[in-house]
């Protein structure tokens, strides 16, 4: 089967030319024929039932394929194809949307491995950020490949087709019934709202109920990754002391605490023929001779939380022979290291590998007293070692599920259950939105140093898909010599991106930067409830996050009841609606120049006090204003990186 538009394809939606295609065994015998029921079609001994329903402003197209009379069939391939007129559009299609990253200049083939990587969803938008057409599938477990253009052609602009194919991993499925649902939206709304609607639909379909976010995940957070793996007990303790002084509440010990930089295997290999490796990951004794004592001391003396980085799918510097050889019973032999040696990733389709992950996480949580674990190197290893790897694991071990997607789904579910059995209020973070029902926290890995525009685009994307979970940007850093106004802009991004996380060398930070960090953390703490749980929305003309103006991110607002927070970036500013219940407005100037005026559209007339604040949120001027109902242009004069507060007087 080469393309969707075959003579036997089924036209699921005539208006937008959404077609279904199947490659089956036994094969289809000819075109689909309608029955007396307008929702049911037949093709020799196959039956296709269809249904159309509404979800907010979108259509949902359901279908169910079965064999008549009842019997099994083999699904070799399934495709959804959508053709539409070429319009003024860019195509922000998913790329690492597990991290909620969207870009417009994408390759002709966009791989979405669902549970192991991205959601199967694409949105096409105009250059002003308005949705033209969005298409997505319900199933986040099955692997899916996405193409732009009618036959996978490479087109930067004026695209006119999208094609999803499954299975990505090439594994035929023997079924009695195959069903799926297609999300289709041509609603003229911001791409953000349409994408959020898609994700709300997926959540509703799978009965998602958000897990409460634990206190340790509400931050602010400091992460040790700026040191890479060059960490030890002394450095983490001294950084924790500095973090406490700056208003940080959680210390995140990143990579390096149990993977020593040495050529040989480390002291307690995770997978050995001698021990089978279950639950035997321990701290590198050379760098952390008393890790539990360190964690307890941070808890008791500083009152801070402690997280750790963990990789229970990764065997690290695997060796093939000898007493420390990786147990090949657990490895996915499709994946090789760059030099062609033994695989380093465990097969999630193997129940023993999942048992290893459960015991691994329970062991390190209970032994070291961590308040949460953030998982890395757990997705499909193709994300790290190759762009596309066909086929499934062929290792000589048990597979209790058919696909990597199913295995990874079970892997995350079992790991989360194991963690909560040890510590019910622990932070669980899988950096993939497809698995957020097992997480209680969401984060965007984003190593962009002092680039607030780039950070902000990432924040908007995270908020699109992380509905229901408290989220953050990771990891914020800057050079010691960075200008204060640039640091202040970066800190404002972290606050408006919700939970702030810093990756700064706290042992070598300048005094002026310390002042800014303390001030930002204090502001965040004062308004944490509203910043975390307020209604979040990008606005403004250019909020495409792609295309020729990709360096100009959206303005963003967070409505927190009586408080309204505004992030004002470099693009043209539309009038900002202010509700009648709003009593305070906080404005962060993220422009690289002063913000002279602010267009407000007020629900009622009132007297206001305008305070202009410096980089550390201290007042530098105050003015009394009478603002009338409707559109008002307020002169604010906010410097670069600075902010302002408008307070409404009692009516």
Image (cartoon, rainbow, N blue to C red):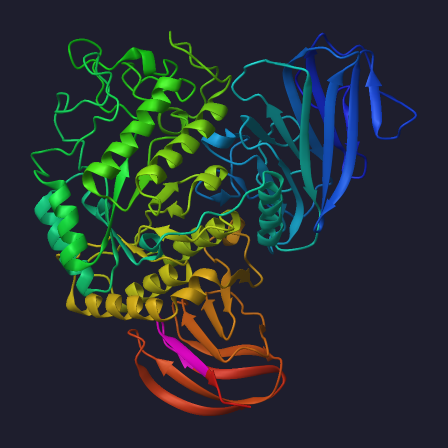
Q: Main secondary structure of the magenta part?
A: strand
59 to the left or right of 597: right
In the current view of this chain or complex, which residue is farthest to the right?
Answer: 36
Residue 470 in view here: yes
Q: Is residue 438 above or below residue 512?
A: above
How many numbered marks does the figure carry?
Answer: 0
Q: Quadrant of residue 254?
A: top left
> Whole-percent x and y of residue 110?
53, 31
Nearest the eye: 30 or 108:
30
345 to the left or right of 318: right
137 to the left or right of 325: right
The part of the chain drawn in magenta is: 637-646
Nearest the eye: 143 or 508:
143
44 to the left or right of 414: right
> Whole-percent x and y of residue 57?
71, 51
Which image quarter holds the C terminus? bottom right
Nearest the eye: 346 or 32:
346
As for residue 621 lying within the magenta part, the answer is: no
Q: Residue at x 38, y 89 (%)?
A: 622
Q: Is residue 553 above or below residue 607?
A: above
> Whole-percent x and y of residue 334?
39, 15
Residue 31 in view here: no
Which image quarter holds the N terminus? top right
Q: Residue at x 60, y 27 (%)?
A: 152
Q: Residue at x 68, y 33 (%)?
A: 181
> Whole-percent x and y of residue 558?
49, 65
């Amino acid at each position: 089967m080469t393309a969707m538009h075959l003579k036997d394809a089924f036209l699921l939606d005539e208006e937008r030319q959404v077609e279904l295609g199947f490659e089956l065994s036994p094969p289809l015998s000819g075109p689909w024929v309608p029955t007396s029921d307008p929702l049911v079609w037949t093709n020799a001994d196959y039956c296709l039932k269809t249904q159309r329903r509404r979800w907010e402003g979108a259509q949902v197209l359901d279908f169910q394929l079965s064999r008549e009379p009842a019997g099994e069939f083999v699904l070799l391939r399934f495709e959804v194809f959508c053709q539409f007129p070429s319009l003024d559009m860019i195509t922000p299609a998913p790329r690492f949307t597990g991290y909620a990253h969207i870009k417009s200049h994408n390759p002709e083939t966009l791989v979405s491995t669902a549970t192991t990587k991205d959601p199967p969803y694409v949105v096409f938008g105009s250059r002003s950020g308005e949705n033209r057409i969005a298409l997505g599938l319900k199933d986040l477990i099955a692997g899916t490949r996405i193409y732009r253009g009618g036959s996978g052609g490479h087109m930067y602009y004026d695209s006119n087709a999208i094609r999803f194919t499954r299975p990505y991993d090439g594994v035929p499925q023997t079924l009695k019934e195959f069903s799926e649902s297609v999300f289709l939206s041509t609603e003229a709304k911001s791409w953000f709202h349409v994408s959020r609607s898609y994700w709300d639909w997926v959540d509703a379909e799978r009965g998602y109920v958000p897990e409460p976010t634990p206190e340790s995940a509400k931050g602010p957070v400091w992460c040790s990754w700026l040191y890479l793996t060059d960490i030890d007990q002394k450095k983490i303790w001294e950084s924790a002391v500095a973090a406490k002084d700056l208003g940080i509440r959680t210390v995140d010990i990143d990579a390096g605490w149990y993977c020593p930089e040495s050529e040989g295997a480390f002291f307690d290999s995770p997978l050995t023929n001698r021990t089978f490796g279950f639950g035997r990951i321990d701290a590198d004794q050379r760098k952390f001779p008393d890790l539990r004592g360190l964690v307890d001391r941070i808890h008791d003396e500083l009152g801070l939380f402690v997280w750790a980085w963990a990789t229970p799918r990764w065997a690290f510097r695997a060796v093939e022979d000898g007493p420390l050889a990786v147990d090949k019973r657990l490895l996915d032999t499709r994946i090789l290291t760059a030099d062609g040696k033994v695989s380093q990733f465990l097969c999630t389709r193997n129940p023993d590998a999942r048992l290893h992950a459960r015991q691994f996480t329970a062991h390190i949580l209970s032994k070291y007293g961590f308040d949460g674990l953030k998982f890395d190197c757990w997705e499909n290893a193709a994300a790290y070692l190759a762009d596309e790897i066909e086929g499934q694991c062929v290792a000589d071990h048990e597979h209790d599920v058919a696909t990597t997607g199913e295995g990874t789904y079970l892997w995350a579910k079992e790991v989360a259950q194991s963690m909560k059995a040890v510590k019910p209020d622990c932070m669980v973070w899988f950096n993939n939105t497809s698995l957020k029902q097992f997480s209680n926290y969401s984060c965007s890995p984003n190593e962009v140093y002092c680039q607030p525009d780039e950070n902000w685009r990432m924040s908007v994307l995270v908020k699109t898909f992380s509905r229901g979970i408290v989220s953050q940007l990771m990891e914020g850093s800057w050079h010691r010599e960075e200008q204060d106004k640039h640091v202040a802009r970066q800190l404002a991004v972290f606050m408006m991106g919700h939970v702030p996380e810093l990756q700064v060398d706290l042992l070598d930070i300048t005094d002026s930067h310390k002042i800014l960090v303390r001030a930002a953390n204090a502001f965040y703490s004062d308004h944490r409830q509203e910043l975390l749980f307020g209604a979040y929305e990008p606005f403004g003309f250019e909020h495409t996050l792609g295309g020729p103006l990709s360096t100009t991110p959206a303005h963003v607002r967070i409505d927190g009841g009586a408080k309204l927070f505004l992030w004002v970036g470099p693009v043209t500013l539309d009038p900002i609606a202010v509700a009648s219940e709003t009593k305070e407005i906080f404005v962060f100037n993220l422009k690289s120049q002063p913000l002279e005026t602010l267009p407000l559209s007020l629900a009622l007339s009132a007297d206001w006090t305008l305070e202009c604040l410096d980089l550390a949120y201290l007042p530098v001027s105050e003015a009394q204003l009478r603002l009338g109902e409707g559109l008002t242009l307020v002169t604010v004069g906010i410097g670069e990186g600075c902010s302002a507060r408008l307070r409404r007087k009692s009516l």
